[in-house]
Image: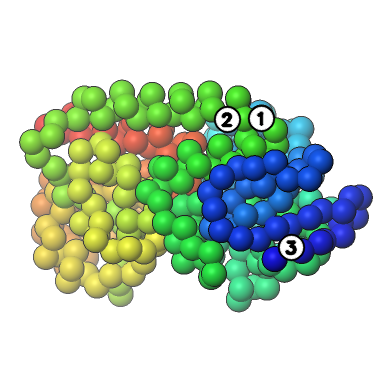
Amino acid sequence: MKRTVTATCAVLFFATGCGATIDEGPADTVVVQRCGEDVEYRVPQRAVAYEGGSADKLFVLGLTDHVHGYVMPPANPPVSESPWADDYAAVEFLGDDLLNRELVVDAGADLVVAGWNSGFSEQRGITPELLDRLGIMSFMHTESCYNYPGFPEVVAPLEGLYTDLERLGAIFDVEDRAAAVVDDLKDRVDAVTATVPTESEVSVFLYDSGVDQAFTAGNQVPPNDIIDLAGGRNIFADLTQRWTQVGWESVVEAEPEVIVILDYGDRSAQDKIDFLTSFPATANLPAVVDEAFFVLDYNEGISGPRNVDGLERFAEFLAQRR
């Protein structure tokens, strides 16, 4: 099936199908997968990024001149703390609300970069299919694609990061730059794993939020890989989910030796630690008794190049505890 979509300044062609190869399309286009769907892209000039992970992927590839602006929900830490703070300052801040159709249309976006159900949403009426009809290209984080309707794609989260950088490199015609960035990230990961002992794993619980139930990480989000590659074992690694709720009973039964606190939003990491320390169900967990808490920055926990920063820091934390 082939769809022709009229945009403001150019006619864009979108081809759908299955396959993982990056192919040349018609003149000035390239075929790249969006989750499991083949789509034709032209080089974007007014990209809009939702959340830090999306913007970071564009900035680390040196694409600031192709970015019109970003949408940053208030839960995200300040962009002034980002390694790419200067790049954020060079583009337009478009809002601190959830992604929506009116915002990207008003911005004159020709590409929107976000995750499935973390930016794009059927409930909120902004999906890649809808944007196709409006002549606006879209790109989804591979890490978020495992339950994308019709075109799922399941990969390990860090592999999804590398895939995204390579695909964005193809879309923006900077393949060599993308390859260099990916090689550097892989070298840093290899340097971590080379120092991790293989004889023992540390059981780890990631606490995002929640009181009646715990909101935590399944195996489809970057913290699962961060924990695993650093020498730990996510106690919920058997859940093929992204971010998900679990009962406190299952946390208690797993007896985690370390707790990773995802730091974001109005509730500080220390507030979360204080809750786990005082909450009867968790107060006697080995990690709580030993005060074995590690604070993971929000942008180290969502798909983006800062995942490797989080891995390096967590591996060092575990090494110091051995």
Could you say where residue 125 lies in the image, as x and y percent from the top left?
Answer: 68, 73
Labels 2 & 1 near each other (Cβ < 8 A): yes
Circle 2: element type: helix
Q: Is residue 89 visible?
A: no
Asked if residue 121 lies left or right of residue 263, the reply is right
Question: Label 1: which residue?
Answer: 174
Q: Is residue 54 above or below residue 219?
A: above
Residue at 14% in and 64% down: 252
The answer to which of 221 and 9 lies nearer the viewer is 9
Labels 3 & 1 near each other (Cβ < 8 A): no
| Residue placed furthest toward the left | 199
Could you say where residue 174 lies in the image, as x and y percent from the top left?
Answer: 66, 29
Labels 2 & 3 near each other (Cβ < 8 A): no
Circle 1: element type: loop
Residue at 71% in and 51% down: 40
Q: Marks 3/1: CA distance?
A: 26 Å
Q: Amino acid at mark 2?
A: Ala
Could you tell me which quadrant the N terminus lies in?
bottom right
Q: Quadrant of residue 279?
A: bottom left
Q: Amino acid at mark 3?
A: Lys
Q: Amino acid at mark 1?
A: Val
Question: Label 3: which residue?
Answer: 2
Residue at 78% in and 45% down: 26
Could you say where residue 122 lies in the image, as x and y percent from the top left?
Answer: 61, 73
Question: Label 2: which residue?
Answer: 178
Q: Quadrant of residue 199?
A: top left
The answer to which of 61 and 35 lies nearer the viewer is 35
Circle 3: element type: strand
